[in-house]
Amino acid sequence: QSVLTQPPSVSAAPGQKVTISCSGGSSNIGKNYVSWYQQLPGTAPKVLIYDNDKRPSGIPDRFSGSKSGTSATLGITGLQTGDEADYYCGTWDTSLSVGQVFGGGTRLTVL
Amino acid sequence: EVQLVESGGDLVQPGRSLRLSCAASGFIFDDYAMHWVRQAPGKGLEWVSGINSNSRSVGFADSVKGRFTISRDNAKNSLYVQMKSLRPEDTAVYYCARMSTTTWHRGYFDSWGQGTLVTVSS
C-alpha cells in the first residue's frame, strides 16, 4: 500500500482534459514539494512536473500541476493518444525517517 | 545529453548478493546526488536509496535498510548498490536516477536510466 493515494485509472477522449489526484498527509505533501512522472509503456519514468507546478524544458504546457494542503493534482489538456501512460506523484516524507514516497500510479487511457 | 546506464542485473538465489552499477555521462557527476528506484513487475515505483554528491550522507528505504549499501565513485562517474541477503520481494527493475540537487533528500528525479532487472528466485 502506497503512502500517497492515486486513482488506479482515468480515461478520456482525445482532445479532452483529465485530472489525476494525489492524496497524502502532513509529513509528506503537506510540507514538501510534489513532482509528477510519466512512464510510457516499456520505458523509464520521466519528470513532467516538479516543485508542485513547474515544468522542465521540453514539457508542453498541456501538462500542469497544483497543490493544496495535503493533496496535489496533475492536469492534462488536449489529450493525445501518445499520452497513454502511467503517471506517478512523488514527494519527500519526513515522518520517522526521511525518504521519497510515490503514489501507486494512475493508468491513463485515451479512448 | 544526460545518460545513465545501469548494469549488473541477474537471476540470483534468495540469500545471495548482487552489485548493480550505473555509468553516468553527459553531465558533471560530482554536482548531483544520485538514487536507486525500483519497480517490481507490474507494480509502482519504490524508492530504494540515495547518496549525496560528496558521498557524506546516504539514505535507505526501510525495506532494504541493513541489507543494501549505496556508494559512488566520482572519478569514474559511477553509482553502485551492493545488495545482500536478497529476497524474492527484491525482484524488480532497478533504475538509477539523478537528483536535481547535491543533497539526496532534496529535489526531484530529473533523469532516469533504462533500468536493469534483478530476479531473486530459487
Image: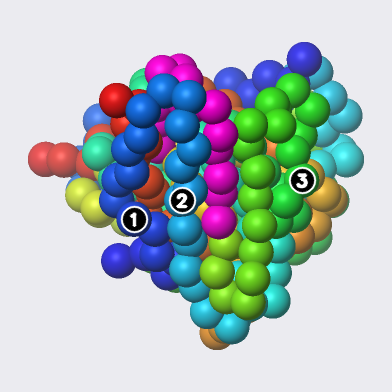
- Few, some or many residues within 10 Å of mark 1 (<14, 14–19, 20+): some
Above or below residue B122? Residue B58 is below
Residue B41 is left or right of residue A38, and the answer is: left
Labels 2 and 1: the sequence-earlier one: 1
Q: Distance between the residues labelled 2 and 1?
A: 7 Å
Q: Residue A20 carries which label?
A: 2
Q: Do labels 2 and 3 share a chain?
A: yes
Residue that appears at 64% across and 32% down: A62
Image height check: is B62 above or below B25?
below
Return the residue at label 1.
A7
Can residue A81 be seen here? The reply is: yes
Amino acid identity at mark 2: Ile
Q: Residue at x 46, y 32 (%)?
A: A16
Across and down, in percent, residue B56 comes to: 80, 60
Q: Do the residues labelled 1 and 3 touch (CB within 8 Å)?
A: no
Left or right: B93, with B103 as reference point: left
Of mark 1 and mark 3, the one earlier in the sequence is: 1
| Residue B63 in the figure: left or right of residue A45 | left
Is residue A84 magenta-colored? yes
* Chain ID of residue with mark 2: A
Amino acid, disc 1: Pro
Q: Residues within 10 Å of mark 3 (few under 14, many from 20)?
A: some
Query: Helix, strand, or loop for circle 3?
Result: loop
Q: Nearer the viewer, residue A53 or B41?
A: A53
2 or 3: mark nearer the eye: 2
Residue drawn at point x = 16 percent, y = 40 percent:
B121
Query: Are the residues under marks 1 and 3 on the same chain?
Result: yes
Look at the numbered disc 1 and give the secondary structure of its residue.
loop
The span picked out in magenta is A73-86
Looking at the rendered structure, the kind of residue marked 3 is: Lys
CB atoms of marks 2 and 1 within 8 Å: yes
